[in-house]
Amino acid sequence: MAARTSIEWTEATWNPVTGCTKVSAGCQHCYAERMARRLRAMGNPRYRRGFEVTLHPDLLDLPLHWRQPRIIFVNSMSDLFHEAVSVAFIQSVFATMEAANWHVFQILTKRADRLLELARLLPWPPNVWMGVTVERQECVWRVDLLRNVPAAIRFLSCEPLLGPVVLDLRGMHWVIVGGESGPGARKMDLAWVRGVKVQCQTAGVPFFLKQLGGRIDKRGGDRALLDGQLSREMPVPMNVSRAEVPA
């Protein structure tokens, strides 16, 4: 439920919640759903319920036991702001992130409406980055809601990028772009990627191209190159100085 990861823009994952339900076009070929089914078939006890939303309270304090500072993607196998996750449980996740201030935590949601509704009930320490997914133009409303969340770093994930998007990047600190990969992957037009990159450059917002997508192995080679260049900018350096780890 927590491990080093091959996700290019983070260092580890922490999953106090697993399972989700589809809310928009970007969910159609959900990698987490495929992985959950595989883990259930392998007999993993955390996935006895497959991809149904499941809380794991015994994992809430796990980052407190990681002494080496890490950048941690929260709930890579779920959405913390899913309606089936109680406010109290979300507050417990935030309490851990606030206490484990030597780590950086990255949260990503498609449920920007619930995020904004609950934002006033949550602490927003500087080590918590909050993002929303914007896979196509119909989803840019999530950016407007995120702008009102008092996170130190607000970011957008345009993955899988399914069409051209025009973004209002005021108050945003980072944009990730990626193509869809795996079975049934929908093709990403490089013109869409270039469009996002230009918008980021104009607004002075770091741009991170994760991968171009497709059925074949997305890692290595030219799978993350745009016009011969690797774009892997971060809002702060990956080796950012963090709080002292308590003895």
Image (tube, rainbow, N blue to C red):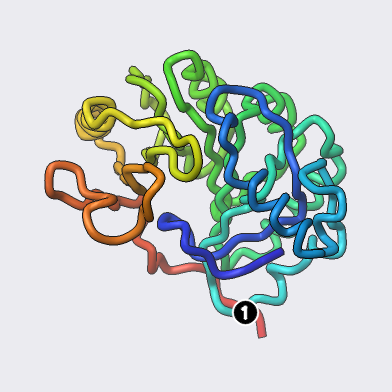
For the residue pair 227 and 67, the one nearer the viewer reads as: 227
Q: Is residue 136 above or below residue 242?
A: above
User: Which residue corresponds to the image point at 28% horizontal and 26% vertical from the top-left?
Assistant: 192
227, 153: nearer the viewer: 227
Name the quarter where the C terminus is drawn. bottom right
Could you tell me if residue 192 is visible in this image?
Answer: yes
Q: In this view, which residue lies farthest toward the left?
A: 228
Examine the image and state in which quarter residue 8 appears.
bottom left
Q: Residue at x 77, y 58 (%)?
A: 41
Left or right, residue 214 beside residue 110: left
Q: Is residue 132 above or below residue 130?
A: above
**Residue 202, horizontal then vertical, whole percent:** 20, 29
Q: Which residue occupies the foreground of this view, 32 or 58? A: 32
Circle 1 sits on which residue? 67
Q: Is residue 174 visible?
A: no
The quadrant in which residue 197 appears is top left
Residue 22 position in % (x across, y down): 67, 28
Residue 145: percent from the left, percent from the top? 57, 22
How many numbered callouts?
A: 1
The percent coordinates of residue 13 (x first, y second) are 60, 60
Label 1 element class: loop
For the N terminus, the quadrant is bottom right
- Amino acid carrying label 1: it is Arg
- Neighbours of disc 1 within 10 Å: few (<14), some (14-19), many (20+): some
Q: Is residue 37 left or right of residue 53?
A: left
Q: Residue at x 72, y 35 (%)?
A: 81
Would you place residue 89 above or below residue 38 in this image? above
Instruction: Locate residue 196 relative to residue 34 in the image: left or right.
Output: left
For image coordinates 57% across by 55% down, the residue present is: 73
Q: Does residue 197 lie above or below 125 as drawn? A: above
